[in-house]
């Protein structure tokens, strides 16, 4: 669970350590409800949130999307209506730098909710977005352990719901660890299945759930520390009617004689694929864009403290991987010492 109001400083610090400005950040369990407004602001991002409904008597819940403030988007409340109270959600339609549109969403399915009803509503949601011929990335805490899909019928039905809608869960390793168990309950569901996207898990102890991510192929997360402001680059291909027509024309006008005349089928294939790749790269070349890093660190976080924070994350990863008493104690001891140092640094900067 992640109570944003109590963890926002940790979130900002971790984003700074990562040295990466995500286009969209999804947060489930903001702990915001209609009777308990929460400050969800994050510098450099526009926030779109949905508080937990007043009819829920328990704490928790609430979902939010953070869209980097240089990105165009529109809120899609119409998609929220499909949830039919079976899960909490928020959606936006993002317009990327290449003018390509896609739907981004944050999903939170409270544990104990009827999974059959969720599967039905989620199926309707995916069908609706697919009918618009839109790409989508739906991140969140589904509370459905996909590691049990072979032994639990409704979990298997959830997986089949994804497959029948030409979608896949992008995360395939556990995202939540207990002393004697590991579960895969946090995920990103998408109908964009190609080699241009990289998905994975980030190791941080901000919450008892590990964050998941998806990035375009040209992007990478830098785990090194940096100064208070920096920039990052990413690559993309400008795919539109103009570049596609250029590619089509190049294919028509290309000289394929060497392919036709080759009697060795394997060599002919190599010649064909090489020429095809060359024409594709010439017609729709990779371009590089540079975007400023907008997550500024607190002034008391020195370079030395950032190095220590990175070391704490490594110790946390080791404790999850090794699960030995020594590794766990080493992480906890270092975490406690670092916490004292951070509090001391913050206190003394204002003295």
Image (cartoon, rainbow, N blue to C red):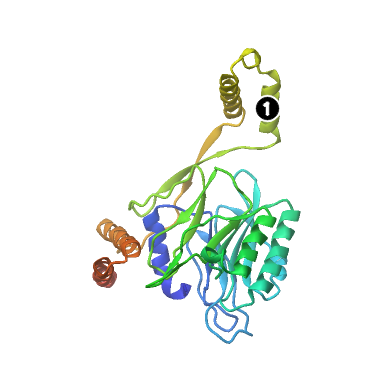
Q: Position of residue 246 (x, y in %)?
A: 68, 27
181 sits left or right of 58 in the view: left
The front one of 253 and 259 is 259
Task: Pick out the residue farthest to the front.
Answer: 151
Q: Give the quadrant of residue 10.
A: bottom left
Please tell me whether residue 330 is drawn above or below residue 201 in the rendered image: below
Task: Pick out the residue farthest to the right.
Answer: 131
Mark 1: few, some, or many residues within 10 Å (few <14, many ≥20)? some
Please tell me whether residue 232 is drawn above or below residue 288 in the rendered image: below
The front one of 150 and 308 is 150
The front one of 200 and 349 is 200
Please tell me whether residue 216 is drawn above or below residue 26 in the rendered image: above
346 sits left or right of 212 in the view: left
Q: Position of residue 274 (x, y in %)?
A: 56, 24
Residue that carries the numbered disc 1 in the rendered image: 246
350 sits left or right of 51 in the view: left
Question: At 67% across and 61% down in the image, what residue appears?
Answer: 161
The front one of 178 and 48 is 178
87 sits left or right of 349 in the view: right
Question: At 67% across and 72% down in the image, what residue appears?
Answer: 116
Asked whether residue 74 is in view, the answer is no
Question: At 71% across and 35% down in the image, what residue appears?
Answer: 241
Instruction: Quarter of the image for the C terminus: give it.
Output: bottom left
Please tell me whether residue 28 is drawn above or below residue 23 in the rendered image: below
Q: Position of residue 268 (x, y in %)?
A: 60, 19
């Amino acid at each position: 669970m992640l109570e944003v109001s109590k963890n926002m400083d940790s979130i900002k610090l971790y984003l700074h350590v990562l040295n990466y400005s995500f286009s969209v950040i999804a947060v489930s369990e903001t702990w915001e409800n209609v009777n308990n407004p929460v400050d969800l602001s994050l510098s450099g991002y526009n926030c779109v949130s949905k508080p937990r409904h007043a009819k829920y008597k328990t704490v928790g819940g609430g979902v939010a999307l953070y869209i980097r403030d240089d990105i165009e988007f529109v809120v899609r409340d119409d998609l929220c209506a499909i949830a039919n109270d079976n899960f909490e959600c928020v959606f936006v339609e993002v317009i990327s730098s290449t003018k390509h549109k896609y739907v981004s969403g944050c999903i939170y399915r409270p544990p104990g909710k009827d999974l059959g009803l969720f599967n039905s509503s989620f199926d309707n949601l995916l069908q609706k977005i697919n009918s618009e011929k839109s790409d989508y990335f739906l991140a969140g805490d589904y509370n459905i352990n996909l590691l049990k899909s072979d032994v639990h019928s409704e979990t298997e039905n959830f997986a089949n719901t994804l497959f029948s809608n030409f979608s896949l869960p992008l995360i395939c390793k556990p995202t939540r660890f207990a002393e004697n168990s590991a579960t895969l309950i946090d995920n990103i569901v998408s109908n964009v299945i190609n080699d241009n996207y990289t998905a994975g898990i980030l190791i941080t102890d901000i919450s008892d759930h590990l964050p998941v991510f998806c990035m375009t192929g040209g992007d990478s997360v830098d785990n090194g520390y940096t100064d208070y402001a920096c920039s990052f680059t990413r690559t993309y291909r400008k795919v539109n009617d103009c570049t596609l027509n250029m590619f089509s024309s190049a294919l028509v006008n290309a000289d394929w004689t060497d392919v036709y005349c080759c009697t060795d089928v394997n060599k002919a294939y190599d010649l064909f694929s090489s020429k095809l790749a060359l024409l594709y790269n010439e017609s729709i070349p990779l371009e590089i864009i540079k975007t400023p890093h907008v997550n500024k660190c607190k002034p008391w976080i020195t370079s030395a403290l950032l190095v220590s924070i990175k070391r704490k994350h490594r110790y946390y990863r080791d404790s999850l991987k090794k699960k030995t008493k020594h590794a766990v104690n080493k992480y906890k001891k270092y975490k406690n010492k670092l916490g004292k140092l951070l509090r001391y640094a913050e206190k003394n900067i204002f003295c």
